[in-house]
Image (tube, helix red, strand yellow):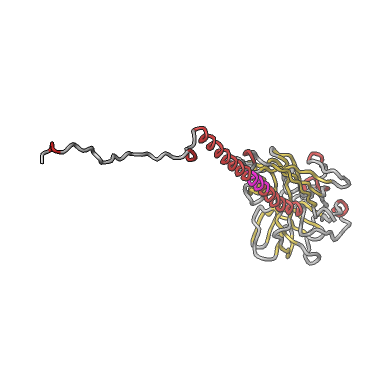
Amino acid sequence: MSAGAFPSLPRTRARRRRTIAMPPASMAGLSLIELMIAVVLGLLVVLAAIGLFTSNRAVYDSTEALSRIQENARAGFELMARDLRAADGTVCRTPVDTSTAAAAASPEKMPLIRWAGAASKPAWGFGLWGDGLRGWSGQLGDVIELRSATAGAVPIETHISNTLSHVGPPRFRQADELLACDGNTGYLLSASGVEGSAVSYTPAACNAVISGNCDEEQLPLDPALRPAFLAPVAAIRWEVGTNPRGGRVLYRVTPASGSHVGDDRAEVIDGVRTLTLRYLLPGKTEYVPATQVGDWKAVRAVRVALELEASPGGGAGNEKIGRRIVHVVSLRNRNP
């Protein structure tokens, strides 16, 4: 059959139409403005959370700084109060013979003190034993220096001429500043020689200006009559100074004296702005500064005021936190 015998037939193959699914109107995306509003709201929430965390952190830092100040003050006051209470203390406090000049001048249990050591001492050396303590103003606040002879005391066996022999092994060195005493009298002396348990000294004229209480003759101590003791004279000074790190520190200083060369400075409290000391005299109700104390032997109590500050960063806004803490200490050797 020829091709022309049949008419041409139309193409019946259906053309596939490509269709794209369009999302409904409810599934339309965010506009740029809506997206920016959402970002801003999210940032506000984050900033609020950061602000709350920062505020809580500042409160925590402030509380921690205050706790540190209180703990430092407590530790410092305990050490300082211990030294103040022991000021003017000896192992021989109560006079046996109340008719002596010392008992008449110092009814608060001060035994007679005679000068028996080297011939010359500075104006405020250990020779001013009758004072027991002295204060003055320093560059960074008030300063107080204390004297006592209670620790390290040993019984005396004999007192012959200018030599004292004590019980036990050797414990003193040449140039040590010592107090030899019984219940009625005492000798301040500087050891000129030490041989075993025997301590010798060079006698000197008794000087009432230097030693406070004085009698003409220097009677030897008699352990058979009254128990006698030999004790090192200790000096402690409290002051505010600058440490090698550049901060202000409350120092407990053992001054150089006798065989002890150079000051021993121990840091007690850091972050101290200043130390203020006031003194109570008999018959008074107001505490006075050191410049108004005429007789240091009459001081009965000391009021200690410490101004402390926390380390930088201890408070909100990175500022320092400060506190002023006051403590009163009664001198037990001056009060009944």
Query: Magenta stretch containing residue 63, yes or no?
Result: yes
Residue sitting at x 88%, y 58%: 98
Residue sitting at x 83%, y 46%: 280
Q: Is residue 205 visible?
A: no
Residue sitting at x 64%, y 56%: 173
User: Is 9 drawn above or below residue 69 in the view shown?
Assistant: above
Expressed as whole percent of the image width and height from the top left, the position of residue 151 reads 71, 58
Split into 4 quadrants, where in the image is the C terminus? bottom right
Question: Is 89 on the left-hand or right-hand side of 9?
Answer: right
Point out the residue furthest to the front here.
5
Expressed as whole percent of the image width and height from the top left, the position of residue 76 reads 69, 50
Question: Is 162 on the left-hand or right-hand side of 217?
Answer: left
Question: Is 176 on the left-hand or right-hand side of 33?
Answer: right
Q: Nearer the viewer, residue 17 or 111?
A: 17
Q: Nearer the viewer, residue 112 or 253?
A: 253
Expressed as whole percent of the image width and height from the top left, the position of residue 84 reads 75, 51
Q: Nearer the viewer, residue 294 or 51?
A: 51
The magenta-colored residue range is 58-66
Expressed as whole percent of the image width and height from the top left, the position of residue 207 reads 79, 47
Q: Nearer the viewer, residue 184 or 50?
A: 50
Q: Is residue 169 visible?
A: yes
Split into 4 quadrants, where in the image is the N terminus? top left
Question: Is 298 on the left-hand or right-hand side of 126?
Answer: right
Point out the residue furthest to the left here.
1
User: Is 155 drawn above or below residue 140 in the view shown?
Assistant: below
